[in-house]
Image (tube, rainbow, N blue to C red):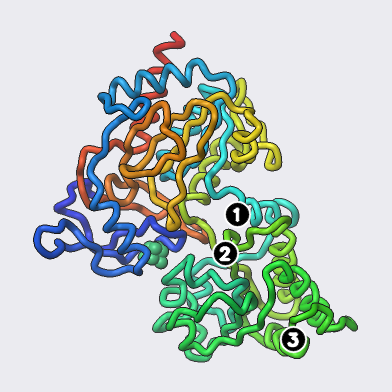
Amino acid sequence: MWTSDPAQTPGNLTCPFCGLACDDLSVAPGPADAGLVLVNGCQTARGAFAGAMAAGPGTALIKGQPVSLEAALAHAAGLLAAARAPLFGGLVTDVNGMRAVLELADRCGALLDHVGADALFRNLLVLQDGGWMTATLTEVRNRADLILILGREVPHRFPRLCERVLLPPEALFSPPGERRLVLLGPAEPGPLPAEFAAANPTLIPVALADLAGVGALLRGLIAGRPVRADAIPGVAGAQLKQLAGWLCGARYAVVTWAAGELAFPHAELTVQAFVELVRDLNRTTRAAALPLAGTLGDLTANQVCTWQTGYPLRSGRQQGRSCYEPLLYRHQDLLAQGQSDLLLWVQALPAANPAATPAAKCPTIVLGYPGLACGRVPEVFIPVGLPGIDHPGHWYRTDAVCPLPLGQVRDLGLASVAGVIGKLSERLGATAE
Ligand code: SF4
């Protein structure tokens, strides 16, 4: 049972800093009254945790000037009440925060988009189009004997994937020491992390933009069609033939990728090629896809939006009805085209590559973790606590099978996103009555 008393914090904390949501973290007092430090986890988590702990509680601001929280809430509620086409973006929050966002969106008639929705939709469009066969992290950990990794950034975006899933110390049905790792992606940049390199993976150099073509070639080879394996310049046909043989011979092949890395036009076609490959393999053996996501709560926001409204993100709540437009409701386009008259940006956790909030031309209300960089001085800034550090909550990891509990390690009196938005909803309700 979770307790909100920081002194009673249990040892197994869930990490909110990437989609793996490792649930084995623990904190301890740092040297020389430096506060709590993370004693395990990866370098990404330790850096993010230290940065969060170094920041104070922050202060509410109107046009960059410190004000009381009550004054900031009143001003923000006035802006929301006056808006005709509000956009709620960022959406980096936990389950309760997203539930509150949806309630407020319902009240205001707002459109919804996540900061990482470009990557989210590279997967979602494929899932919507034809479905997919995926595995949980536990299945991959215990059963995979061949792991095909697309791209080069997976080990960096999900730092403990190797340790916890791909090459764990032990597994139930597939000895980790006998697993075959294949990396299909750019030869550059730089060396692989040590634990990946130690597994002696097979590297097949392929430009990201050629991955879809390679996926199609592999499908042809697996089906025994008369394809030219060397049809893609710079990609070794002999290596593709060998890989096709390994895939057919594997008892449980897994294809994994981080959609965030596939940042080129129509990358969903690349995802689709390998989702279809997995489907083909299941005619004769067992295989699964493992799409890696969940960082910054993209899956959390999307799950909650889907179960509450029946539609995923890039949807809106207008006049009590949902409208879903994955191509029209991209927040970057709405802001660039001036189609929104108010932006509410929610970002309760820092990104690995800190990006400022969008410099929108319309008035902006930011609910952000203390220290968040804003692209332009917002009309209102309200500091919120980090889920997993300042308040407990729930969070979906990459395989989205169930929400994991987030803990709390300090109490600075920072309100959660759900708490702040709940107060805004109350004020809007009072205004409407
Ligand atoms: S791999 Fe991800 S979830 Fe695990 S400790 Fe590192 S940042 Fe946190």
Mark 3 to mark 2 CA distance (whole Å): 23 Å
Name the side, left or right, on which 169 lies relative to 269: left
Identify the residue position indicated by label 2 in the image. Answer: 258
Q: Could you tell me residue 385's position as x and y percent?
A: 31, 42
Earlier-in-chain disc, 3 versus 2: 3
Query: Which labelled disc corresponds to residue 384?
Result: none
Identify the residue position indicated by label 3 in the image. Answer: 236
Earlier-in-chain disc, 3 versus 1: 1
Residue located at (67% from left, 69% from top): 208
The answer to whether marks 3 and 2 mark residues whose Cβ atoms lie closer than 8 Å is no
Residue type, label 1:
Ala
Name the side, left or right, on which 426 lies relative to 141: left
State the residue in front, 311 or 331.
331
Furthest residue to the left?
Answer: 32
Identify the residue position indicated by label 1 in the image. Answer: 119
Q: Could you tell me residue 109's position as x and y percent?
A: 57, 24
Q: Nearer the viewer, mark 3 or mark 2?
A: 3
Residue type, label 3:
Ala
Residue located at (48% from left, 90% from top): 177
The answer to whether marks 3 and 1 mark residues whose Cβ atoms lie closer than 8 Å is no
Residue type, label 2:
Ala
